[in-house]
Image (cartoon, rainbow, N blue to C red):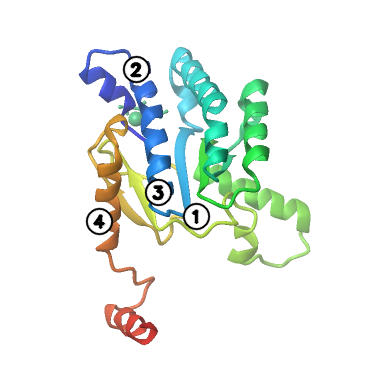
Amino acid sequence: MDGNGRWAKHRFLPRVAGHRKGVESVRSTVQGCAERGVEALTLFAFSSENWRRPAEEVSLLMQLFVSALQQEVERLHQNGIRFRVIGDLSRFDPTLVELIANAQRRTAGNSGLALTVAANYGGRWDIMQAVNRLRAEHGSGLESWTEAQLQAYLALSDLPEPDLFIRTGGEQRVSNFLLWQLAYTEFYFTDTLWPDFDAHALDLAISSYRQRERRFGRTSEQVVASQDSRS
Ligand code: IPE
Ligand code: MG
């Protein structure tokens, strides 16, 4: 979710105004995904690199996170959404950690959209915490580990790998998001700034995705043949 600051700057508003408007885009995108039958939505809200921002902005982002949790969790629950946060929570304020834990507990039994917020998350961090936990639990007993063994310790290991990656705000990079999980994901970049990302923008991304042919290393002819044999 990129472009909050620029959205505000274009309007001669403080950056915080962009972040506030960005929360509205989160709300509408969650709703849009739920309505469209999307199985899982993962939002990159705050990267491990974002601590480098001015202290005032970091603290404001945290406050927004707290107030969004306070206001939205009940609604998420009513809509059958299963909410969780991935990332290193050790640097967060205990109040926020507590709110996250409550929200996760409250919605754990839901079977609708799996909504994940990545906070103080980094793809490299994810891989390293998986390696460390794998090693801690299995020691050096194993000669070499398989991808499947490592995968089980990564964040989102219970979800299918993402089909579509959307980055708003015009930059064309991954910025240490889900590095492992994005191996076969389709990428979609848009100049739309996150606060302007609405249902129409979501539909544009999904229709772009629908035009892609996903070959997973095979040839186009093989893909077409396997689709024919299935229908
Ligand atoms: C994304 O918007 C929001 C967060 C990283 C929390 P930015 O704040 O990066 O917006 P720009 O890139 O300055 O426009
Ligand atoms: Mg940015």
Q: Residues within 10 Å of mark 3 (few under 14, many from 20)?
A: few
* Disc number lying in front (2 or 1): 2
Upstream in sequence: badge 4 or badge 3: 3
Question: Does residue 185 lie above or below 192 as drawn?
Answer: below
Q: Mark 4 falls on what kind of element?
A: helix
Residue type beneath disc 4:
Ser
Residue type beneath disc 1:
Trp
Residue type beneath disc 3:
Glu
Question: Does residue 114 lie above or below 170 as drawn?
Answer: below
Q: Mark 2 falls on what kind of element?
A: helix
Give 213 or 107, whichever is nearer the viewer: 107
Q: Position of residue 30 (x, y in %)?
A: 43, 41
Kindly indicate the quadrant of the structure image that contains residue 149: bottom right
Q: Is residue 189 left or right of residue 66?
A: left
Upstream in sequence: badge 2 or badge 3: 2
Question: Does residue 117 lie above or below 184 as drawn?
Answer: above
Q: Which residue is mark 1?
A: 180
* Disc number lying in front (3 or 1): 3
Task: Kindly report the distance in space between the C-alpha atoms of the residues bearing marks 3 and 1.
Answer: 28 Å
Q: Position of residue 9 (x, y in %)?
A: 25, 18
Q: Mark 1 falls on what kind of element?
A: loop
Upstream in sequence: badge 4 or badge 2: 2
Q: Which residue is mark 4?
A: 208
Which numbered tag is attached to residue 50?
Answer: none
